[in-house]
Amino acid sequence: MKLKLLTFIIIISSILSIFAVPAFAAEIKVVDISRPEGSEIVTKDIFSICGTCVYDEATIELSYWDKATEKYEALENTDGKSTFKVGKIFGTDIKLNKGENQIRIKAYTKSTKDSAQEKNYTITYTEEKKQDSWWEKALNWFGGTNEKQ
Amino acid sequence: MNNKSRKLVFLYEKFKAFLLISLIFICIIQIGILWSSQSGSFPISLFSNPKITSSISIEDSKKQYLLPYRVIISAGFFKEHYIIENGTREYEILWKGAVNYITQALKARPTQIRPYNEDEWGTLVATKPYTFEFKTQIPIEIVNWTLDLGKTANEGLSGIYKIVICPNDPDNSYSDTLYIRDGKKIYVYEIKDYKGNSLNQDVFDEVYKQQSGDHHSNYQMTIEMYKRYNIPKDLLGMFSGRSKESYPGIVCKPISGLNEQGYSYKDFAQISKDLFGNSGSDYDYDKDVNSTIVFRKADGVYRLYKNSILEYKYTGNQTNIEEPNVLAAYKNAIAFLLKHRSQKSDLMSNVSVYLSSITQEQGTYVFNFDYSISLGDKKGEVPILPKDYTIPNGGDELNNCISIEATSKNVIHFKWLALKFNIEKNPGRSDWNFGEMYQKVYKQKDISFEDFGIYYVIDNPKTYEKVITPSFVLYTKDGRYDVLIDSK
């Protein structure tokens, strides 16, 4: 009987350690990032990060994955700030490097600093392929060259 | 009776007949003068008031009252979008081109009619090159009349609220395509054999180059930045970067003499001249029990309040059992506005008027208009919004610069913000961001806005001169909010 009880306690403890502990340490949602929605491929070097704040005010920290140091380093927005306060609705611009940019957005309030919301995004900046004007596209279409491209 | 006395009688009768004809003629002239001075018209042009005939006719100037309040060019989704300032050369070029397209489109039937979908419309505005937006839906009867289209095959199109134009539209077999939005649906018009080149790639390139070269703010669209939220998806704003543009101060000056405690004959004459120009002498003026200046004409009374609101009320027969006709009421409203604009040489000389809303009341329509002040030399315009203006002694609010209530027969109520506007010489520089302004102006928990923009808000009505600077104005489901933009 005692063995059965001990086994039961061990099983319950194991389950709790697997599910409950990470749940208690889970990050608290501070902001809702509306852009980027996920990984994006863009053709402009200035990228806009936008979203709304669950609280009246929050702090945002931007960082990027530095391949040389192999760790996340502070990323400055176009105003020269990597940590800044935001209100109910916010947006900020960052300058991208060519190729893959691994960005981390961290958001917290004074009371949630220890369990900050954090998410990584990969934004790939490629140079825009020179596009024909819509007039040229139309001429190509009428001339039947559109399909060849 | 001898020959001599018969001749005398004949001459006497001839004289009487001549006198009678002269009296009838003088009588007609007098009736004509009275009629033309009271109602501004007479059936025979000979007797019409020269001051009225010299004014601009409604047919010549009706197009000035059908102007989009926002023109946008777009290089594509997630690419550059620019708002073309009203009153500039580029604005005029683009609107003229758009009128050509609209005229051709409305003569044909729409090729597709789709229910309005916010995401679809937002994507169209962000993707296609040209967008033209009115502040309110313009009823199709008014559009047809203004553009001299007669009756069109509108297939249920009730009016024009917003228009997207894409010459050689890749999503529509490279046809010139118009997407017209009324309150409920999107109507797609394909223009076949369009002969003009008014909005072609060269025009787009020229305007785009000018906008990007002038460092105008590069706007983003809500569909690009806040797609998931319950807000209109076709709004443009500086959602991430900062807007750093120069804005001049606007000097608002009430009519001189209005701040006097007692009015002399000279004051009355000056005020009446400012309001009615050379026709000022046609009005009888006085003060009422509240010391408000009153001008009377045969069929109406004007009151000029201390806060610069001029109110007109029709005093003639107002029994109107007919269902009002929006076009007839609009024509009356425009004719009334034109007549007063042509009289007020100094007051309205640098003002453009935009139709802001149309509401149907019992037997009448109310047309609200707002001012945009010209910066001169086609440098653009700045929009004006009145705030806290109320007709004294429990009267209505005036939320727009001009409000005209008209029936199919005449104008019965008219409210007008009678101020002179001058541009200050040294412009200030503003520096703002949408998020900051939103936080300052709207304290509610949920995210809500229906529109926003930069306006010059005239508040705290004063009888003396005042300088106003731009404000950020947010339209939400709870109403309109505004906050001054810091100037540097």
Image (spheres, rainbow, N blue to C red):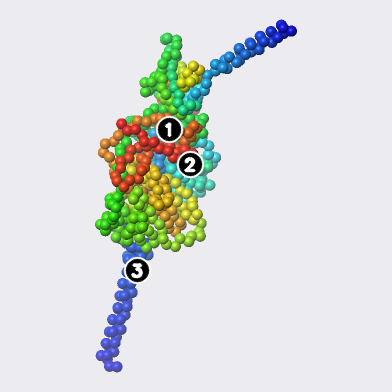
The amino acid beneath tag 2 is Ile
How far from the left and from the top, in percent, is residue A15? 64, 13
Same chain for the residues under marks 1 and 3 in the image: yes
Is the C terminus of chain B in the top left, top right, bottom left or bottom right quadrant? top left
Q: Position of residue B405 (x, y in %)?
A: 43, 53
Q: CA gap, disc 2 to disc 1?
A: 30 Å
| Relative to B414, residue B247 above or below | above
Residue B60 in the image: above or below residue A65: below
What amino acid does circle 1 point to?
Tyr
Chain where mark 1 sits: B
Image quarter of residue B18: bottom left
Per the image, the residue denoted by label 1 is: B438
Residue receiving disc 2: B180
Foreground tag (1 vs 3): 1
Circle on res. B31: 3
**Residue drawn at (33%, 43%), measured in percent from left and top?**
B373
